[in-house]
Image (cartoon, helix red, strand yellow):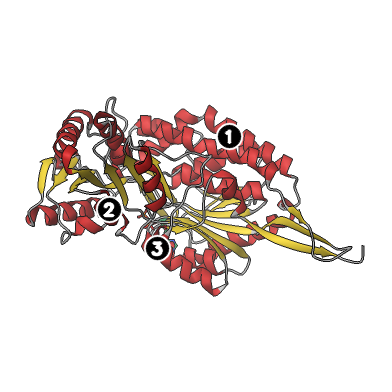
Amino acid sequence: TLLQLRQMHLLKKNAYINGEWVSAQSNAVFPVLNPADDAVIAEIPDMDAADAKIAVDTAANTFQTWKDTTAKERANILRRWYDLCVKNSDNLAEIITAEAGKPLSESKSEIVYGSSFLEWFADTARHINGEVVPSPWPNKMIMVTRQPLGVVSVITPWNFPFAMITRKVGALMAAGCTCVIKPSEDTPLTALAAVQLAEEAGVPKGVINIVTSSRKNAPAVGKVMCEDPSVGCISFTGSTHVGVLLYGMAAKGVKRVCLELGGNAPFIVFPSADISHAVDQAMLAKFRNNGQACIGANRFLVHKDVFDTFVQAFKEKISKNCILGPGTKQGVTCGPLINLEQTKKVTELVEQALSKGAKALVGGKPAAQLGTKFYESTLLTEVKPEMRIYKEEIFGPIAVCYKFETEQEALQVANDTRSGLASYVFTKDLGQAFRMSRQLNFGMVAINDGILSAAEPPFGGIKESGIGREGSKHGAEEYTDLKYTLFSGL
Ligand code: ADP
């Protein structure tokens, strides 16, 4: 219940700067709502530029000592943080479901997934190696080391409120950086809970700071986080629109950026595919988090020979397996959308497509009887290029299916987007699988699978989907600078 949630020790109602749970200097607050029923879960500090400046200065001061800790010390702290997240996973999951709306089982999966980054970077911390390169000169040595780049400003979205923080903060801490986090205004409580556990794990004060703010104050807070001279890197996950804004601010100070932006993932089904497996994976790739994932399948491209079979099976699975309701209710698989703007956008995209001749085989309208932010799980066919839904990232529970005839055509349509994050291909033809891997212009290609994210592989996109990689050994390197020292006169 709401009362129990409010009394949970992980439910913090203040921001976190220099190891203190603090209010905004102005004492302003904003409400955090449960998207399923609009109940106010908590009121938390609505910070502004002045608070952000204090947080950045704190992170900069702390960097002076944190950068000199050993990799082993940082690894041990990350490992303890991982252990505490696992131990507290039920409570963390309840907080995620309360503020993000996703079903409790998905929130638990997010804790498993998100914690795995802390575990991974605990290991990685001790392998951020340099190089000694043979020099072109006698009696001189070229030494290359990796140095932490300083304060990282972390700005995160609401769709994976825990994992988007651990994936960034685990990496930057492993590298020896400190940070200021501005979590999404929709889901700040998960971030605060994660940091409570970081404190319990022994993360020294000032290494992680959290500035909470409403959407109204986000631009002012963001400006300090991007433009303050002591910030070395801006690490952002969110919309391409906001990413471009932050990139512009970072450019003024020639700062490093790590941007994970929107996707527009194709999900391509060839005739040789195991169709029933493809449909199962389509359910995961489309309806996880109710379609609100940047790697979620946005366009189903299905070969004409298997189109009817795939669409029919997909329709049956959606009708049977998509159960809408509040994330806390047993058996629910699809929660509410995060907020009214998202619901409005999804509603408009589908209405426009239907008015121009698209067909809804299931769903096609808001599920208003459940609340203001619920939308029916929907399957559309007969979608044409002149419809907005053809080009845009939907970020909702709408599966759109197109028919294609040749491999060349599938590739051309799949690549015809400014985004380049994830892509999915279903085929049993090995040659075709390799051709797809090579020719799809995306940072990630999954062959015969609908879920590809983990701590081990590099996550990230090309084109307007972003810059940099998260997870993997490359994820920690993003937060380092290469330093070359020449030793001469030896
Ligand atoms: P989403 O569509 O996932 O909400 P957004 O890009 O809108 O993605 O938001 C992601 C994060 O960016 C959130 O934490 C939000 O508060 C933040 N944000 C939005 N506008 C700005 C801004 N002008 N400056 C800094 N942060 C911002």
Foreground label between 2 and 3: 2
* Rendered-image quadrant of the N terminus: top left
Q: Amino acid at mark 3?
A: Val
Q: Furthest residue to the right?
A: 490
Q: Furthest residue to the top?
A: 330
Measure the C-alpha gap from mark 3 to mark 1: 30 Å
> Label 2: which residue?
408
Q: Secondary structure at mark 3?
A: helix
Marks 2 and 3 in Cβ contact (< 8 Å)? no
> Label 1: which residue?
82
| Dot 3 beta carbon under 8 Å from ligand 1 | yes
| Dot 2 beta carbon under 8 Å from ligand 1 | no
- Place of residue 227 in the rendered image (x, y in percent of width and height, measured from the top left): 54, 69
Q: Amino acid at mark 2?
A: Gln
Q: Is residue 437 above or below residue 276?
A: below
* Circle on res. 242: 3
Q: Of the residues under marks 2 and 3, which one precedes in the sequence?
A: 3
